[in-house]
Amino acid sequence: MTEVAIVANAFGTQAVRLRGHDAWLDLAARSGATGFEVRRELFSHEADASPEALRALGAAIAAHGLWAVYSTPCELYGDSGVLDADALSEAHAQADALGARWLKLQLGAFRGHAHAEAIAGVTAGRRARLVIENGQSERSGAIAQFVDLFAALEREGAPRLLGMTFDIGNWAWAGQAPLDAARTLASHVEYVHCKSSQGEGARRFPMAPAIDDPVFAAVFGVLPRTAPRAIEFPLDPGRPAGDAQNWVAWLAAA
């Protein structure tokens, strides 16, 4: 069985902003999930990202028997391809205050040089493991970008410096095939975001996968089962507890 987490926005972005992340912890724990992903962009107030508030939220997550992921929309590389060390350092400090297992960032405009030494300087001694996610744009959601990133880390002598969050649904936004991505990048994947999508182009929206979706079955068959899977699609607002429980059971066994 594979561990399953629930991403906070599965309960609805506005609902989380209004009620806070901690309002959903009991439901997540009762669903059978083992992890909970906190989303920086869903904080209602800047004070929610203070060390004190993050430590309190992390303690609440742990009290429910869950491990935490800290997700921020910050990008590892800026427009010019240079490492954004300040953003990484701030995000790491927040993730460690939360007590997170993983810190998740977007890739950004990677341009061939990984700046491995600088990343190592920021991540050394940190509790959270850095995992970079494929995003919903060509510059941060192309298979080739991640191939180049991990090749650069290899050249720079730090092949395991960071891992990957593999978002199955995001590949569609970037016009990439999820199964091709899985076959190419599986050895680097440590955490999996699970969602499908509907619509076209910019008007594409996340949705739950079909139980018999052949793409999900094929991707799960390639990715490591040791990588926890996270629900990042909207749960049924009319019955979130039952819906979460069903999806957690399915993802754990699929």
Image (cartoon, helix red, strand yellow):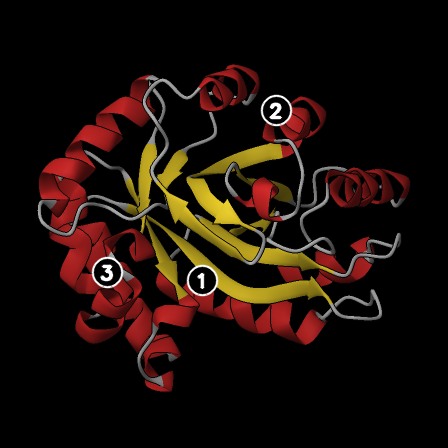
First of labels 1, 3 by sequence position: 3
Which residue has dot 1 on it?
96
First of labels 2, 3 by sequence position: 3
Q: Residues within 10 Å of mark 3 (few under 14, many from 20)?
A: some
* Residue 187 visible to an observer of this rendering: no
Q: Quadrant of residue 32?
A: top left
Which residue has dot 2 on it?
179
Vertically, is 183 above or below 138? above
Question: Could you tell me the amino acid type at mark 2?
Answer: Leu
Which residue has dot 3 on it?
59
| Foreground tag (2 vs 3) | 2
Question: Could you tell me the amino acid type at mark 3?
Answer: Ala
Label 2 – label 1 distance at C-alpha: 33 Å
First of labels 2, 1 by sequence position: 1
Image coords of residue 213 (percent x, y): 41, 21
Q: Quadrant of residue 125?
A: bottom right
Residue drawn at (72%, 53%) of the image: 138
The secondary element bearing badge 1 is classed as helix
Q: Residues within 10 Å of mark 1 (few under 14, many from 20)?
A: many
Left or right side of 118 for 63: left
The secondary element bearing badge 3 is classed as helix
* Residue 17 visible to an observer of this rendering: yes
Q: Quadrant of the N terminus?
A: top left
Q: Quadrant of the C terminus?
A: top left
Residue drawn at (72%, 70%) of the image: 84
Residue drawn at (32%, 26%) of the image: 251
Vertically, is 52 above or below 216? below
Res 118 label: none
Question: Could you tell me the amino acid type at mark 1?
Answer: Asp
